Each structure stands twice: as structure tokens, then as C-alpha cells.
Amino acid sequence: MDWLEALQLLRSSGRPGVLATVTGVRGHAPREAGAKMLVGAESAWDSIGGGNLEATVADRARAMLDAGSTLPESLTFPLNEHAVTRHGKQCCGGVVDVLLEPFLPRPIVAVFGVGHVGHELARILSRLPIRLYLVDSRADQVSTEQLPDVVGGSADVHPVHSPVPDSVLGGLPAGSHVLILTHDHAEDFLLCDAALRRGDLGSIGLIGSSAKWSRFRVRLLAEGHAEAAVERISCPIGLPDITGKAPAVIAISVAARLLQLLPSNPGERNGEREVEPVATGAVP
């Protein structure tokens, strides 16, 4: 497997990596400019020259992964008998410049219920660099014919039909952001219960009015969930200053609030900062 295939593999499985590229060579060096190596947490693919150069680059790349760094780094390696690293010497005689580019996993957003609001929300979110799961218990809502305006954007879109959507929620990676907008209040409740039993999601939003949330809150407490856990669910969802009940308006409001929760600054990673629940904004 070459570095490009490996990068696609890491991306599809939600794992981070660092791409190392030789950007400059002066004098003798084991590889030419343009040589690449991909470094993952446990494996590496292709080569930038072997020896202590490659081992030192791999060490630095994994340190970047551990720190959750999103900023590229440029490093310079003299390859002579005076340049000693923890991996030894490399006496080619030249100097090599290497660019390290980290690739963190895309944030994961799962929308449960692809009705009027869910579809409008999916259209907006599909333009973002995220992994987007669209889950519905109705097969026609997530069919290829239903989603032509969703699958062509920047997001990795995964339509999922399941008669038991809460089982899909249970299989999401930790740190996923969950938005519950189904056509059935009973289904909504099961999804809320399943989300709270996870305990490791990034955020949980439930569409509905304050009256709906009052009823759900009582029932969730009766199911044995702690009050602090129940308060992690935000209902109503969206930004409070964006009013209106049209599906597109609600979708814009919800998407805008979600953007405030997704990593946007260098060095941020899902789950490493306190995640606020999705804010208010009444929806019937």
C-alpha cells in the first residue's frame, strides 16, 4: 500500500496521520525532493530515505499526533557524522528539508431523521469537511433518488436506513455530534435514551418545543439517567436569535450552532475541550 492509499484508509476509518514530504535536498541524500511517507499512530507507509532521518521524522510525526497538532512543520536534517540523533548517524553528506502535514479525523455528525428539516440540514452540512451520517427508519428518506443535492459536497456522506436507528447511534465513534429530528416522538425518545447511555458523544440536540422537552426530561430521569447527564441534551435546538419555523430557517439555525461546537482552531480536537450543549431556539 502506498502513502496515498494509506491516507485514504486512515481518512475512511477516522484515524489521524502525518504526511512527510522531502521538500528540498542539498548535496547527497537517500531520496529526492518530492519523496513522501505517511505516518500513522502505529504504522508508516512509503519512505523518505530510511535510517535516522526517517526514524526521527516518524518520532516527530507521532508527537504531533499525540498533541493533536493541526499546523504543518518544516524540519531540516544535516546528514553528516556530526549530526547525531537518538537513532544514530547518517553520513550521506547532504542536507534534507522535510515538511510534516498533519491530517486529523473529520468531525462526525449524525442526523437522525431526514424529513423536511433533516433534509435541509443535510444540504447545508454536506458542504462542510465532515463525516455526515444520515439515518432514517424510512428507507425512501435516505434513498439515492432522495439525496441528489446532498451527496455532491465536501462531506463524506453516509445514508443509513435502519428500522432500529438507536442501534446505529450506539455504533457511532466517540465524540460524534448527534442531532435527533425524526418524524416520531417515540423514536426520538429511544434515540435520546441511547445517546445518554453512550456517555461519550460530542453533543446531543433534539428538535422540539419546550413542552416536548419537559415531557422527555421527566421520562429520561425516570429511566434512571442522572440529571446532569439529561441536561447534556439540548432542546430546542439552534441559535436563539434566529427565529422562524420554516425548515430552511431551522436548518440554518441548527447548522450555525453546530459550527460553534466543531473544532475550528489549530490544536483543537473533539473531546479535548468542554463541549456545550446545542443552544435554544424553539421548534414545534
Image (cartoon, rainbow, N blue to C red):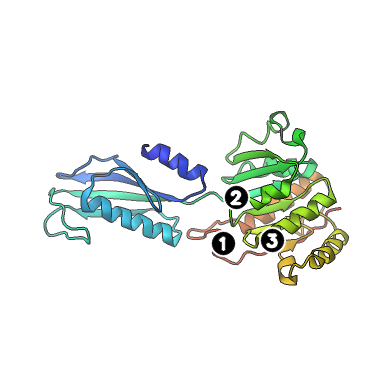
Q: Residues within 10 Å of mark 3 (few under 14, many from 20)?
A: few
Say if residue 83 shows up in the picture: yes
Question: Quadrant where the N terminus lies?
Answer: top left
Q: Residues within 10 Å of mark 1 (few under 14, many from 20)?
A: some
Q: Residue 199's spot in the image, x, y percent? A: 65, 63
Badge 1 or badge 2: first in the primary sequence: 2
Badge 3 or badge 1: first in the primary sequence: 3
Is 29 on the left-hand or right-hand side of 221?
Answer: left
What amino acid is found at the position of numbered circle 1 in the picture? Gly
In the displayed image of the protein, which residue is found farthest to the bottom? Answer: 227
Q: Residue 233's spot in the image, x, y percent? A: 73, 62
Which disc is residue 271 wearing?
1
Q: Residue 115's spot in the image, x, y percent? A: 79, 41
Say if residue 238 shows up in the picture: no
| Residue that numbered label 2 is attached to | 108
What amino acid is found at the position of numbered circle 3 in the picture? Arg
Is 53 on the left-hand or right-hand side of 209?
Answer: left
Nearer the observer: mark 3 or 1; the answer is 3
For mark 1, give the secondary structure.
loop
Q: CA distance from mark 2 to mark 3?
A: 18 Å
Q: CA distance from mark 1 to mark 2?
A: 12 Å
Please give the name of the residue rendered at 83% of the width and 61% of the height, measured from the top-left corner: 216
In the displayed image of the protein, which residue is found farthest to the top? Answer: 145
| Residue that numbered label 3 is attached to | 197
